[in-house]
Image (spheres, rainbow, N blue to C red):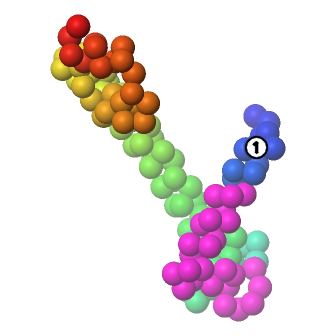
Amino acid sequence: MKLSPTHIALLAGVVAAAALALYLIGHPLICKCGYVKLWHFDIESAENSQHLVDWYTPSHIIHGFLFYWLLWLAAVIVIALEVFIGAMIRDNLTLNVLMFLWPLDSVLQWQQGR
């Protein structure tokens, strides 16, 4: 998979926003020791989780996979419920947002059963 310049810029923006948010709530941008190591071996030190990779990194990756899977599953359920409710009562969150942002006469007539 090749990343486009747009994807790289978005990724950099997300990383910068996360760093800014952490900084604004009082977290240092790098380890208080003043340097960043690629791998931190000691699990019982104040520098733990302050460097790029440590013993908790595999756990963080696993959590990322699990959260992604749960959100993906929830998205499949949300879409099914939106379609079902839309078909049954001609109203749902998607239609509400659409009609708020860009009202369409055809959608309004369909919702009113005309």
Residue 2: x %, y % from top left: 79, 36
Residue 62: x %, y % from top left: 51, 53
Residue 76 appears in the rendering: no
Per the image, the residue denoted by label 1 is 6
Residue 102: x %, y % from top left: 44, 30
Asked if residue 15 is positioned above or below residue 73 in the image, the reply reads below
Residue lying at 20% horizontally and 11% vertically, measured from the top left:
113
Asked if residue 52 is positioned above or below residue 24 in the image, the reply reads above
Q: Secondary structure at mark 1?
A: helix
Q: Quadrant of residue 22?
A: bottom right
Magenta stretch: residue 11 in it?
no
Left or right of 42, for residue 76: left
Q: Which residues are magenta?
A: 12-36
Q: Quadrant of residue 100?
A: top left
Residue lying at 69% horizontally and 50% vertically, measured from the top left:
10
Q: Which residue sits furthest front?
A: 105
Question: Dot 1: within a 10 Å radius of its alpha carbon, few (fewer than 14), some, or many (20 or more) residues?
Answer: few
- Residue 110 versus residue 54: which sits nearer the camera? 110
Left or right of 70, for residue 42: right
Report the amino acid beneath label 1: Thr
